[in-house]
Image (cartoon, grey):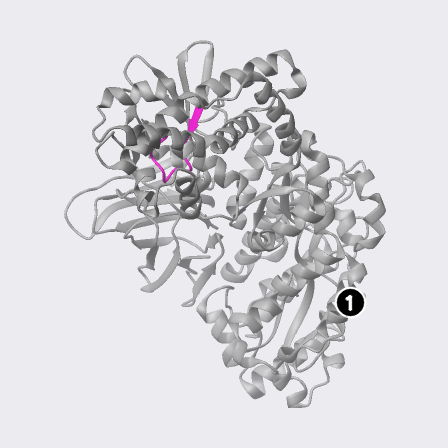
Amino acid sequence: MLLLGCNDSSDTPVTLSENGIWYGTGTLELNNSGNSQYNFTVTKDGLVEINLKSEEDAYLVLLDSDYNLVSQNNDSTEGSTNSKINETLNSGTYTIIAASNWLNTFGEFELTVSSEENIVSGLVLEYASTYTGPLNFEGSVLSESETTQICLDLNDNYKCDENEYSMSSQNGEYSFDKKILIELKEYNLEKVRVLAKVSNDEELNYLLVSNNLSDLYISPMNTLLNAYMNFNPMQTKESAQLNLLNELNISSIGLYLFERGEVSASSHSNNMKFYSVSKIVEKEIEVAYKSAFEIGENNSQLSLDDESLHLFVATMIIEKLPEIAQQVEAKINEASNIELTDYQTLIDEADTGYTEVEFSEQLDIYSEIVLKNIEINAFGDYGNYFQTLYEDLNSTANVLIKSTPNSWGVHHNQLILNLENGSGAADVELIDTGLIGGYLNDGALLDLSSEFEMYKNNMVDYAVSQGQNELGQQVAIPVDLGPGVAFYRRDYMEGLGFDLTEVMDSWESWLSYGRTLRDDHDVYLVSNVDGIARAIIYGTVEPGNGIYIGANDEVLVENERFKFAFNMALTLRNEGLDASLGMWNDDWYNGFNDGLFAMEIQGAWLLGHMKGWIAPDTSGLWGASTLPAGIYGTWGGTFAAIPTQSADKKDAAWRAIEYMISPEAQLTGFKEWAMFPANKTVYSDAIFDEEIAFLDGQKARLLFAEIANNVTPILPSKYDNIAETLIVNTALQEVLADGRDIDEALKDAADQLEARMQ
């Protein structure tokens, strides 16, 4: 979460989400001690001044929504303001890169709005000027005569594709200008490895890799390390290094050998052994690639894709490491002082390779293993989810998984790029319900209708419908839901003599309750009007329609549903019934603890946060209810899908999804991370009948299940996310902040949405 700017017409700072909104124009002052990158939206045309303050020489880059350069400044003069951008901007979404000249810097930055002197913190994303590192084979740096292609493996397929940034090494050294990472901001760059495609001759190419961008040295041993971690995804880098050292009979003191740019044949036994083994491994990688290529040419059934081939080669060599190490150690023990030239003799004489028959047999076995080895890309708590269920997925679903968790924004941005490029997506991708419409009808996801048929009736109806494309094919499988719930303060309800049923009966009775709280008790009804507008927009969708787009692709945002939602929000704001707080900041958290507002309308998942860390000391003061006026709505949820580019692993990928929607996995996710089950057969489990102490003993999970079963199916659209930005994040804020006419704001938003749909 980021905070960026304030409303021109209010003294209250505005809380921004990851893709936040900046109300109006003005001056931004950035106190930057590292590197930062974030998005913001300007809701009206005007002059924007951005000042970057840093102790180091620093610079600013301003990009538009398509990441085209708008302006940049790199002022290294003396003084506290190192860089400044002063631009007249049209309304729209922009990206700011604020960076010092540090490399690999992570931390926190402080952002101030000069007019209010409000200092807040935000998450720093990596950005720096240049990466430079030797292409080093543990002491054997490539000579000028050897050509090596270096690339960033953005789509994780162990290939240097045309659209990936690449260069050739010079004397074994490679470097790339990290300013290109502006263009690559959608990627989780900590997960991107560097590839070296080595060509000693035109016919033979073999691959060496780094573990990720933080490892600048591409070497045989780091290549093995990468493969080892790929097949042991729950291991840390250090534990994997220790395991490899153990195979070499080198103590943990040798950890530094993986990190050094050059390891020579010195008198130290660890150095000598590591150097020699590295040289042998390099030779074995080359020979293994050649053997695998020849076998694949003669037997297409044993042909592997680039990733599988690379991991197979590395795995085969890892199995030979103890044998290689023994030969090296025996040679070292023969003499007390081995000359450097003797190492080449040792390497040339090493007999550690596989015969072609052995290689073919192992390749046959490995091909079967590859088909059950799948990758799952996830976000949020699903990182912990897959770590916990790793063994169960292996034993029950017969799959070996590698799960890559990212932030919500990075995950979905990278997924879009990978699906558009036709490569780089995981075998199973998790997709947020708010974005699912954008993935259903472009042919990028496999049809799972036949596999899902036997489970279809076990799942909540509206979520099943949301995962179907326009042909009725089930291309996305619901795995968790977000039933919309009104969490209310009991001390402001029955504690003050109010009856919950009467209060929630209609919008008018609900407003009347809020006015009494305001006048007699100095308490706000809700924290912010945005949630109320969303409750109406999401929860009163006309049968057969989507939230923003109708069954015939007509734009709906000027109908009575939206007008009522906007009028309700404006009434709450004008009458002082909302606290005008954003979410996920200290003011919001304090509001829960201090009793600032009487009700919070969100997904059922909020309960876990409230009792876990937002307001644990308020246990017993809260209750849960359906939404006002009998509305049943939903806030969030997650789908699992298999990209078409993973068709060869469909069986294993489906087994993983099949396990995720099983009662056992659904209950584990619910108990551990408050992931509300999409499988309604578990609603009869004893956990749903348990009293929840935080809610004063209420059996609220039964209520959540009731809400989930009563949500009306909604037609998803690929334009939902765009519409959300135009209507709720922009038009509604213009009405609330600038006094814009509701009909005019909705018409303008409708026109913009129609233009984007063309």
Q: Position of residue 276 (x, y in %)?
A: 33, 28
Q: Is residue 564 visible in the rendered structure shown here?
A: no
Q: Residue at coordinates 49% horizontally, 71% vertically from top-left?
A: 589
Query: In this figure, which residue is indicated by the disc labeled 1?
Result: 685
Residue 704 lies within the magenta run: no
As drawn, the residue found furthest toward the top would be 202
Q: Position of residue 564 (x, y in %)?
A: 69, 62
Quadrant in the picture for the C terminus? top right
Task: Please report the residue visible at 76 percent of the width from the left and 79 percent of the height from the top.
Answer: 501
Q: Which residues are magenta?
A: 207-218
- Residue 328 position by quadrant: top left
- Label 1: how many Cα within 10 Å (few below 14, some 14–19, many 20+): few
In the foreground, 315 or 17: 315
Horizontal side of 40 relative to 521 (left or right) equals left
> x, y percentage for residue 134?
29, 29
Coordinates of residue 742 in the picture (x, y in percent): 61, 57
Identity of the residue drawn at 47% across and 9% down = 203
